[in-house]
Image (cartoon, grey):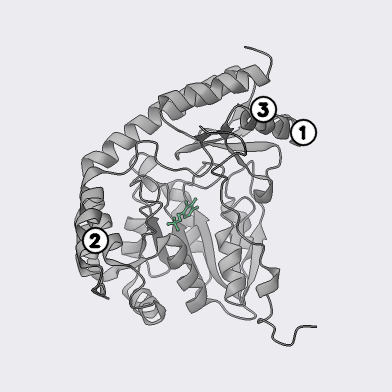
């Protein structure tokens, strides 16, 4: 027995496995496994990053004021109520560290993002999984699962990997129905893809038990940079600020993210392109007898007859150099999550699914 042992719960954490990015023996691949932006990164962000290389000897600022101001201006939010982190993953982590500990419970839903139970366990808390209803968050089931130990409820809206979402009325009902002392965290990683959804901002303005997390990794095309942010009641921002590493974001990250968030045309263009090819891909798969829910994000969830068929399809796609995401670890063994790529990638993956189905 090793004598130096971690705190209880740490060894229960299943290591997070990202989407594969390479296939043995394949020089050129189509990567549709990590919901990355097929249009790349906005030019102003790339240029700001390049300018930042001239000051790498200097420590970054600790208050992230310029980035928070830019986010505030673009989204109509008070910069004082914004906290920036190394991806929204860090914000999720800080929330668990600050609000959940041993004997506390953290609710996530059946097909929810794996970082929620990971961060809950890292804080020593107990993750509680609540069943969904036909791949949708079930508000009543979440409310019923709350106990006096519940501290946090994590809901991604739109959700990953299902692509479904709760509407404003459901979100309000959830926020209003939670016991005191429970914070509702709305993970808005894909909010920009979902039409005119405000990611919960209006709800946060009216309540003190709702918080949102956002990211630069998806529509802003900066997954490699690691920048995310949170917005919520001032009291919660003040708590998280105490445990955040003062230098958690480097100068190039801050500069590139600030330039990106000011590029509103980029967001509009990516949203339009994504919606167009998301619909196209959805229709193409449904026409081939592969079930697909209407996604509000930048991926679709393809449902096959059973696990065997989804694994066989995945193997065929890999053989053709296309990487999609298996989602058995999300409780969806008969499904594959496919990022909405550019036109060529969408046509390619649809064609190969057709070949697999014996239709091409
Ligand atoms: C991709 C994703 C994020 C983003 O995480 P970052 O750490 O900001 O890159 C957050 N939540 C969900 C549900 C995601 O799918």
Q: CB under 8 Å between callouts 3 and 2?
A: no
In this orientation, does residue 7 appear? yes
Q: Position of residue 280 (x, y in %)?
A: 46, 23
Alpha carbon distance from label 1 to label 2: 49 Å
Q: Residue at x 42, y 47 (%)?
A: 190
Which residue is drawn at the image coordinates 66% and 81% (left, top)? 6
- Mark closer to the observer (1, 2): 2
Q: Which image quadrant: the N terminus?
A: bottom right
Q: Is residue 183 left or right of residue 192?
A: right
Return the residue found at the far right: 1
Query: What residue is shown with label 3?
Result: 316
The residue drawn where x is 42% and y is 53% is: 188
Using residue 219 as the reference point, say whether residue 14 is left or right of it: right
Question: Which label's residue is closer to the chain start, 3 or 2?
Answer: 2
As drawn, the residue found furthest toward the bottom would be 3
Task: Please report whichever mark, 3 or 1, sits nearer to the chain's N-terminal start.
Answer: 1
Measure the C-alpha gap from mark 3 to mark 2: 43 Å
The correct choice, above or below, for 349 with respect to 183 in the image is above
Q: Residue under circle 2?
A: 53
Label 1 belongs to which residue? 308
- Quarter of the picture containing the C terminus is top right
Is residue 279 visible in the rendered image? The answer is no
Query: Which of the pair 102/170 is nearer the observer?
Result: 102
Residue at 40 percent across and 53 percent down: it is 224
In the depicted view, which residue is nearer to us: 68 or 260?
260
Left or right placement of residue 9 versus residue 257 in this view: right
Query: Within 8 Å of ligand 1, the CB of disc 3?
Result: no
Q: Residues within 10 Å of mark 3 (few under 14, many from 20)?
A: some
Q: Secondary structure at mark 3?
A: helix
Among numbered discs 1 and 2, the one appearing first in the sequence: 2
Q: What numbered label is drawn on residue 171?
A: none
Q: Say which quarter of the image contains residue 43.
A: top left
């Amino acid at each position: 027995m090793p004598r130096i042992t971690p705190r209880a719960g740490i060894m229960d954490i299943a290591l997070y496995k990202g989407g594969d990015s390479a296939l043995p023996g394949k020089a050129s691949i189509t990567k549709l496994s990590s919901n990355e932006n097929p249009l790349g990164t906005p030019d102003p962000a790339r240029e700001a990053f390049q300018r930042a290389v001239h000051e790498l000897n200097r420590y970054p600022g600790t208050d992230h004021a310029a980035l928070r101001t830019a986010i505030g201006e673009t989204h109509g939010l008070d910069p004082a109520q914004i906290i920036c982190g190394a991806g929204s993953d860090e914000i999720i982590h800080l929330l668990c560290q600050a609000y959940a500990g041993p004997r506390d419970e953290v609710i996530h839903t059946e097909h929810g993002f794996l970082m929620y139970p990971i961060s809950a366990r890292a804080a020593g808390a107990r993750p509680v999984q609540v069943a969904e209803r036909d791949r949708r968050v079930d508000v009543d089931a979440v409310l019923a699962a709350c106990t006096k130990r519940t501290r946090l409820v994590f809901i991604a809206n739109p959700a990953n990997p299902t692509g479904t979402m709760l509407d404003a009325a459901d979100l309000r009902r959830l926020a209003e129905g939670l016991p005191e002392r429970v914070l509702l965290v709305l993970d808005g990683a894909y909010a920009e893809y979902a039409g005119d959804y405000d990611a919960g901002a209006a709800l946060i303005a009216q309540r003190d038990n709702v918080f949102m997390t956002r990211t630069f990794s998806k529509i802003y095309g900066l997954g490699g940079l690691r920048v995310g942010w949170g917005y919520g009641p001032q009291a919660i921002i003040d708590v998280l600020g105490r445990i955040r590493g003062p230098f958690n974001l480097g100068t190039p990250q801050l500069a590139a993210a600030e330039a990106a968030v000011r590029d509103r045309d980029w967001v509009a263009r990516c949203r339009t392109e994504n919606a167009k090819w998301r619909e196209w891909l959805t229709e193409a798969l449904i026409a081939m007898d592969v079930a697909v829910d209407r996604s509000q994000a930048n991926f679709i969830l393809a449902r096959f007859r059973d696990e065997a068929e989804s694994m066989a399809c995945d193997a065929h796609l890999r053989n053709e150099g296309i990487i999609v995401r298996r989602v058995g670890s999300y409780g969806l063994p008969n499904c594959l999550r496919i990022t909405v790529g550019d036109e060529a990638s969408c046509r390619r993956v649809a064609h190969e699914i057709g070949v697999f189905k014996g239709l091409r």
